[in-house]
Image (cartoon, rainbow, N blue to C red):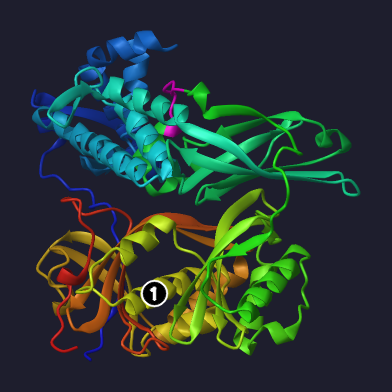
Amino acid sequence: MKKYYLCYLIFSIIPIIASSQSFKEIKQSDKFIYGIGKSPSYEKADKNALSDLVSQISVTVESSFEMLGTETNLNYTEYAKSAIKTYSGTTLTNTQRIEEEKDGYYTVIRFIPKEDINKIFDDRKKAILEYTKEGIRSEWKLQIGDALRNFYWANILLRSHPEYNSLYFHQDNDSVLFKIYLPNKINEIFSNINLSILESSYNEEEQYSKYTLGLNYKDGDIQNLDYTYRNSDNWSGSISANNGLAFVEYYGDKQKKDREVTIRVEYRYEDKSYFDKDVQSVLASDIDLPYFSRCEIKSIYNRTSNGLNRGLSFNNIGNDKIKTTVEKLVKSIEKKNLNPDPSLFTQEGLEAYSKLIKYGNARLLKQNNELKIVKVNDEFIVRSIPMQFTYSKNQQFAEDIVFVVKESGKIHDINFSLSQIAINDILSKDERFATEEEKFFLIRFMENYKTAYCLKRIDYIEKIFDNDALIIIGNVLKKSPKTDSYYSNLSNEEVEYQKLTKSEYMNRLKRVFAQNEFVNIHFEDNVVKKAKRDVSIYGIQIAQHYTSERYADKGYLFLLFDLRDTLNPIIHVRTWQPQKNEDGSIYGLADFHFDTL
């Protein structure tokens, strides 16, 4: 098979366009809006010019913000200026400029043709529409955390747009104003989030109470949701719920009594706004942003209301030895046993257990679990045990854990699960795509991939990348001819490449793992395609959230990998982009050319 390059694409802003206009021409012409800055420091002169330009533009559009101004604590003139300032970190940074130096002072003019004023707002209008569409898709997939984030970000971007009162959303042969649709949609989502008590427990010695909650949206399990909960006079750190489960926990003797639990559902996602500078600038602006009081959900929970502890239950696949092994493993996890019975594991399985139990103060999320066992070749896939992971800096995750058990009854591997929706998407594909066995190998590969980053399994990551693979990190600079035949369909943007060998990439990854207490990967979505009908080579497109102690991002990942040898999968191509292409697509199989498989 021809070797492929591992590519990592980062798109940056197109550089500022220099102008052939003169100071005098700009000032005397009525075709431009301009701002002037003067300072001994060039950077300050340019900043002042940009600030002055913002003021001039806000004057031309302030009447459009009149209604919004009256709805807030700002008059519409102040509101317009605050709104236009949110463009200065992105769109307006790319406006044309003229500069001169005289007598130790720099003078800078930033300007834009009056006829281009509306173009300033076009990108934000597109973003409003795209976030709205993403919100609808996320809601349909029960990714309610993602849906709330997308709808809220669309809503606040709308409040910084001069067409706030006249932008319509067109859907299903109907049209409604965005300013009506978006807040109504957010409130509708909050109204359809349901909490139910699944289990509760109280430890008298530790004075510790824990409630395991079911999270449902209408009739389905919520696939992701971030929330905090009320604890005495404070709020907990952020918790990321997964696959329909949530939890709250309290310390203190009074917690053994019945009490009211208050959960506050996250929807602003300020901590994720860094990957969209427009959103970040609006969140940090003087604009009055809406608060949705329905985000606070209250219920009364009784710690004794959940009945008897049924423990684990299994389907009819797998022998008693396998089920006994899983039951013993779950008890070891419950006791946080760092030295479990080694006879339960293969050597690989024991190493996987050790990493799991040390990951984020691991705890069982539920005692009562219905486990499903699937046999694939000589292995049994047991899914799944929900667990919670807690870190010192108020970050908590809920993840479903999958066990891979040999026919001998020994645990061979432990992985974080994909979402049930992602699993169902793969399993529902017809036989022309893959056999039933191949589908489970595909699921396992993706779960191994996710787990390797979460548990910092550098040995596995080294194993799955082709030894000849290169990591290519680049910045889009400007329009230019295509530069590399392997990326001939990717873009007509010039990319400045930094090529890393596999060894260099692994060394960087080791440093990242060493510097961060935790790494967590969350997949919003996945689309899997086969490169050729009769060959087990696949391309998968994933919307991925990456979170660590020191860094986080969101982007779109594409992997081209070979599963012909199921014991030794190989990744040949990896691309990453922080946002979708203009047509809403992300890079995939069609963007890469290969001669042989």
In the figure, is residue 142 to the left or right of 310? left
Tell me: residue 80, above or below residue 152: above
Residue 534 % position (x, y): 18, 83
* Residue 68: in magenta span: no
Q: Residue at x 49, y 75 (%)?
A: 508
Residue 374 appears in the figure:
yes
Please name the predominant secondary structure of the magenta segment in the image: loop
Residue 85 appears in the figure:
no
Residue 228: image quadrant is top right
Tell me: residue 313, above or below residue 328: above
Q: Residue at x 76, y 66 (%)?
A: 336
Magenta region: which residues?
283-290
For label 1, the residue is: 440
Q: Residue at x 46, y 29 (%)?
A: 190
Residue 277: image quadrant is top left
- Nearer to the camera, 595 or 217: 217
Say which element carries label 1: helix
Residue 268 % position (x, y): 47, 35
Residue 404 % position (x, y): 54, 77
Residue farthest along the front direction in this orientation: 316
Q: Amino acid at mark 1?
A: Phe
Crowd tier of the residue under label 1, counting other residues whose Cα lies within 10 Å: few below 14, some 14–19, many 20 or above? some
In the figure, is residue 251 to the left or right of 534? right
For the N terminus, the image quarter is bottom left
For the C terminus, the image quarter is bottom left
Residue 251: image quadrant is top right
- Nearer to the camera, 23 or 575: 575
- Nearer to the camera, 232 or 421: 421
